[in-house]
Amino acid sequence: MNGKRFADDPQIQKHRWWILVAVCLFTFMSTLDASIVNIALPVISKDLIIPMNRAEWVVSIYLIVICALLLLFGRLGDTRGKIRIFKIGSILFTVGSLLCGFSVGLGFLLVARAIQAVGAAMTMATNSGIITEVFPFNERGRALGMIGSFVALGSIAGPGVGGLILAHLSWGYIFWINVPIGIVAFLIGQRILPRDITMSRQPIDRAGATLFALIIVTLFAGVFIGQEIGFGRPAILGLFTIAAITTIVFVRLELRLDQPILALHLFANKRFTISILCAFLIFVANFFFNVIAPFYLENARNMPANYAGYALMTFPIVQVVVAPIAGTISDKIGPEILTFVGLILIAISQVGYMLANLATPLWLFMFFVGLVGFGNGVFMAPNNAIVMSSVPMKHLGVAGGVNALAREMGMIVGISVATTVLFSAMGHYAGHKVTAYLPAHPDIFIAGMHVAFMVSLGICLVASVITGWRVFHRATPVKK
């Protein structure tokens, strides 16, 4: 197997942990920039003199472009070299971050965010594949656990880090902070990343890549615009119709091709499919927390934004500590049982959120915040190991792209469903349509929050049942 040449090369093995550092830095920054911008939107809106709904496209365009391109870059990684794609992506992300910080206008900022997103997609689609090739099997879970830690840290640390930056500097610095980190990570990568050896040189399914991008753009443009103007409008229904028709055409095309952009045959592998589905569901549940917890702490509990950010940092800090340990244990005992334990812990944390109210001691709420971080740390590393070890070496790029796609789709769906459920439930209790927090009625928010976390608990239980079924019917050993 070609990937073993990396594991047998003493020079590469000497630098394997530095390779992990370079990969993790871009993984952190790419995921951080999906969430750090949210807290700066009011400032950006005021500075650029644009309405808030238009400013929100600074977040939306980043997520849409990443999702649209992940499969393409995963496939390009397999055919042209994962390390080459990763390096190009790191340059684009750093340049895009530099451009994003200039207060020129909304159009310029959206173009810069798109450039940044292209770079992020290139690094996200290839990071797990690079680590799987570089690290020997007995250390792979630990290494993938580190990537999982930085994904979690980036995805949840945005509000806290953004709040700290905005307290002292202009909004441009939430992007410019990436530039020196990106340069350092790129220089490390240039020095120690090896040349690609696993390349198939097969043609790219351009039609499939185009159709998939069209599906993502029309579907999520419909979701984000529909939240603003209503989902019953003809334009929104038209976007959803295009997405549905394109999906049918895409699946039929991919099933006919020998080298499709999305290797649908991978989903015939139950270990792979279950792990991807559970990763998607858990990121949906995590973003219920991301959306609702700041409202609870800052609005309902009247905590200053910086202290709320510190409280929410409990989640990623605990996960960063736990994930590598879980990865190491996974290397020794196998990953399946750990994924099940992690999901049960996450489900228990949702019960804690569901029962929280205005009188809940802050230490108790933070305990459940830490518990969800612990559960994610136990779940993510073994789950990533299952995904990446369930496919042949030649499909590592596609597998990494699908894994990252599940994560990003989970973020978008989580944000969309959480806000929809929260405000719908609040509207039910208020007796009229609600689209924002009601300062005079924290009790209505608490009631809506309970409903939202009840839905989140249901999502976690579905993932737990699916993974529990796999644990108790385990028959296929992990591929080496």
Image: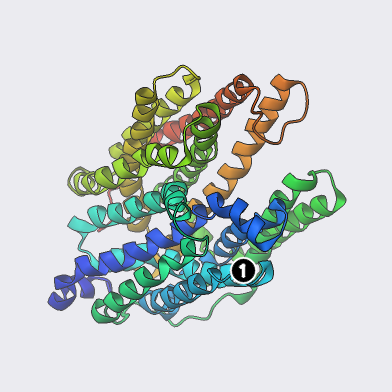
| 480 lies left or right of 13 | right
Could you tell me which secondary element the residue under label 1 belongs to?
helix
Which amino acid, by three-letter code, is at mark 1?
Leu
Q: Quadrant of residue 413?
A: top right
Res 409 seen here: no
Disc 1 marks which residue? 109
Res 328 seen here: yes
What residue is shown at x 48% (from left), y 80% (from top)? 202
Relative to 73, does residue 42 appear above or below in the rendering?
above
- Residue located farthest toward the front when viewing the structure as drawn: 168
Q: How is the image coloured?
A: rainbow
Q: How many marks?
A: 1
Could you say where residue 273 lies in the image, as x and y percent from the top left?
Answer: 46, 49
Quadrant location, the N terminus: bottom left
Could you say where residue 129 lies in the image, as x and y percent from the top left?
Answer: 35, 65
Few, some or many residues within 10 Å of mark 1 (<14, 14–19, 20+) = many
Relative to 353, does residue 218 appear above or below in the rendering?
below
- Residue located farthest toward the right when viewing the structure as drawn: 234
What residue is shown at x 72% (from left), y 26% (from top)? 427
What residue is shown at x 55% (from left), y 34% (from top)? 295
Could you say where residue 369 lies in the image, as x and y percent from the top left?
Answer: 38, 33
| 381 lies left or right of 242 | left
Quadrant location, the C terminus: bottom left
What residue is shown at x 72% (from left), y 45% (from top)? 227
- Residue located farthest toward the top when viewing the structure as drawn: 359
Q: Quadrant of residue 299?
A: top right
| 263 lies left or right of 427 | left
Front-most of 48 and 16? 48
Front-most of 360 and 418? 360
Could you say where residue 103 lies in the image, as x and y percent from the top left?
Answer: 60, 69
Relative to 199, does residue 174 appear above or below in the rendering?
above
